[in-house]
Image (cartoon, helix red, strand yellow):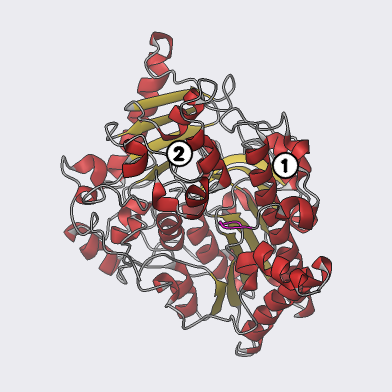
């Protein structure tokens, strides 16, 4: 699926990069008026939206839960455009995911952008927003683009293009609305107060534009990241936790504490949809809705839940993706696998800006311009995902938990390169010594134990049940050591519970996926497979220094 590409972090790559910023011929649209680009990218938002209700569990994790989520604004855009059922992030960790998206390259090619804690951006890496800027676009952002890491939002030229004077309370939606309500404002009025800030920031961005310039606006809310207010799903959005009973995937304990936690998360998804609606109204008011390419997605699966964020299971890497606008043949649902690295070349091609040869993603325009549904491109049948270091700070040297995986429509194959390490970080001294940790601390302090899972009521409940026979297997599956290889049959086992890697009957499938995965890693110069001592195992990648 990939061509041989120069890695900018090798001498050969630096030489080739200098002479290779030209690649893709200008598209037919480039001869016309360049389209505006509106990109909505929500933190920790997995594949949850009403538009995924009824889809098969293998493509939409916990698909039955989407029957309870009301996202009319998002659903409307999906009907106008293309809905992707098999979109994945390259890495289910905020900073490396965003590094890969902004550069259009696999995360392992982005230097210290490949990790979260201790991330540093290398300005030698081309980033698509700055390439659009250089191509004549007015660029701007509100809320999160690239962090944690330093400099903050470096691939977007830092804070230079930030438009946030109207307010940033969208980032803490349920908390903001709850506080306003506590001061006497009705909740529905309080919601509109937050959405007015969303509108105001976009208006400021438009007002700052030079007449006639196309624009690229990045809206990056973090409200679907923790912490949200306990009980807000029911109180603010009427998501009844009791209606989740019997609908949870097997890797999530079907108990009241987890159901309420998940209901609160789904409420934040509905708050996101309200912000999308506000932005669509503002965009229409500019008179440029019809010439705006709209793309909406998230940076990985839900935080603080087993198998979600920081895991290579579908619940962790599968995300929503909708694209609509000029040149897009709408009203379609496609099964093509796409990695979010594909968005950078897609946006650049739409704008008529040459795509650097170092880009590993592939433009989605052949799929977007097609009139077919289902599987459009016969080569888009798999994606590669992975992770290195997230935040684990319990271990001296903060060594990563290195994984790579290949997802197909039928199977998921994972390599855990260091199976002697805990996949979600060390247990922590209190848990390791057998002492209990107060639930409040496990909810509010992510680093109290297993720091690569966000603190949450679900995490606190599951750790509290670790010695109970009924839940020990669930606890071990979430936090315990894992074998070097994992293989799951997605048709027979959509929740990915039964590892077939050691089964003789699956040997041929396992070997074929391993060969394909390793070939892609070597082709794209992944340090993890090119050296016995990859850079990820050494300073500065293992430095405990906290990013700014």
Q: Is residue 413 left or right of residue 204?
A: left
**Toward which corner of the image does residue 286 lie, by quadrant?**
bottom right
348 lies above or below 203: above
Quarter of the image with the C terminus in it: bottom left
Q: Is residue 120 above or below residue 86?
A: below
Task: Name the spot of residue 86 as percent of width and height, x first.
Answer: 58, 41
Q: Is residue 469 above or below residue 192?
A: above
Q: Position of residue 246 (x, y in %)?
A: 72, 28
Task: Give whichever of discs 1 and 2 has the lower sequence position.
Answer: 1
- Residue at the disc numbered 1: 66
| Residue under the image location 62 percent in, 31 percent down | 249
Q: Which mark is residue 155?
A: none
Dominant SS type (magenta): loop
Number of residue marks: 2
- SS at badge 2: loop
Along the line of sight, which residue is nearer the eye, 2 or 447? 447
Kindly tell me whether residue 458 is visible in this rendering: yes
Residue 85 found in image quarter: top right
User: Residue beneath label 2, please?
Assistant: 312
Residue at 40% in and 12% down: 503
Q: Report the residue at 74% width, 46% height from top.
A: 51
Magenta range: 224-228
Confirm whether the magenta stretch covers residue 471.
no
């Amino acid at each position: 699926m990939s061509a041989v590409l120069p890695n900018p972090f090798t001498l050969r790559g630096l030489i080739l990069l200098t002479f290779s910023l030209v690649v893709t011929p200008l598209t037919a649209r480039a001869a016309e008026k360049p389209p505006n680009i509106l990109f909505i990218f929500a933190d920790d938002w997995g594949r949850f939206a009403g538009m995924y209700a009824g889809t098969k569990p293998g493509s939409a994790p916990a698909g039955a839960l989407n029957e309870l989520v009301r996202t009319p604004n998002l659903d409307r855009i999906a009907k106008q455009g293309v809905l992707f059922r098999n979109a994945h992030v390259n890495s289910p960790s905020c900073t490396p995911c965003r590094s890969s998206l902004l550069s259009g390259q696999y995360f392992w090619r982005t230097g210290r952008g490949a990790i979260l804690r201790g991330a540093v951006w290398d300005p030698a890496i081309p980033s698509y927003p700055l390439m659009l800027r250089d191509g004549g676009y007015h660029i701007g952002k509100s809320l999160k683009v690239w962090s944690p890491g330093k400099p903050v939002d470096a691939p977007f030229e830092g804070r230079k293009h930030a438009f946030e004077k109207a307010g940033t309370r969208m980032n803490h939606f349920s908390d903001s609305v709850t506080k306003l309500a506590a001061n006497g404002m009705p909740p529905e009025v309080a919601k509109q107060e937050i959405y007015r800030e969303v509108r105001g920031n976009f208006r400021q961005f438009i007002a700052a534009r030079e007449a006639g310039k196309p624009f690229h606006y990045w809206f990056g809310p973090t409200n679907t990241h923790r912490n949200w207010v306990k009980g807000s799903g029911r109180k603010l959005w009427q998501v009844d936790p009791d209606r989740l009973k019997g609908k949870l995937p097997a890797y999530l304990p079907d108990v009241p504490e987890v159901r309420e936690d998940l209901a609160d998360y789904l409420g934040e998804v509905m708050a996101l949809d309200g912000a999308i609606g506000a932005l669509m109204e503002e965009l229409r008011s500019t008179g440029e809705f019809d010439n705006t390419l709209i793309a909406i997605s998230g940076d990985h699966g839900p935080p603080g839940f087993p198998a979600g964020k920081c895991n290579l299971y579908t619940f962790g890497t599968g995300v929503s993706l909708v694209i609509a606008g000029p040149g897009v043949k709408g009203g379609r649902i496609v099964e093509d696998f796409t990695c979010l690295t594909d968005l950078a070349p897609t946006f650049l091609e739409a704008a008529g800006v040459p795509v650097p040869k170092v880009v590993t993603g592939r433009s989605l325009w052949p799929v977007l311009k097609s009139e077919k549904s289902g599987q459009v491109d016969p080569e888009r049948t798999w994606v590669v995902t992975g992770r290195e270091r997230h935040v684990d700070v319990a271990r001296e040297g903060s060594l990563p938990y290195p994984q790579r995986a290949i997802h197909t429509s039928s199977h998921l194959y994972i390599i855990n390169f260091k199976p002697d390490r805990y996949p979600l970080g060390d247990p922590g001294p209190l848990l390791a010594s057998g002492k209990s940790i107060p639930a409040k601390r496990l909810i509010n302090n992510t680093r109290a134990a297993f720091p690569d899972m966000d603190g949450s009521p679900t995490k606190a409940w599951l750790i509290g049940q670790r010695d109970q026979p009924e839940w020990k297997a669930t606890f071990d599956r979430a936090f315990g050591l894992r074998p070097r290889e994992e293989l799951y049959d997605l048709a027979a086992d959509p929740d990915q519970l039964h590892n077939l890697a050691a089964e003789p009957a699956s040997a041929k499938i396992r070997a074929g996926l391993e060969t394909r995965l390793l070939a892609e890693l070597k082709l794209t110069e992944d340090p993890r497979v090119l050296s016995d001592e990859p850079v990820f195992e050494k300073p500065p990648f293992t430095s405990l220094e906290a990013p700014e």
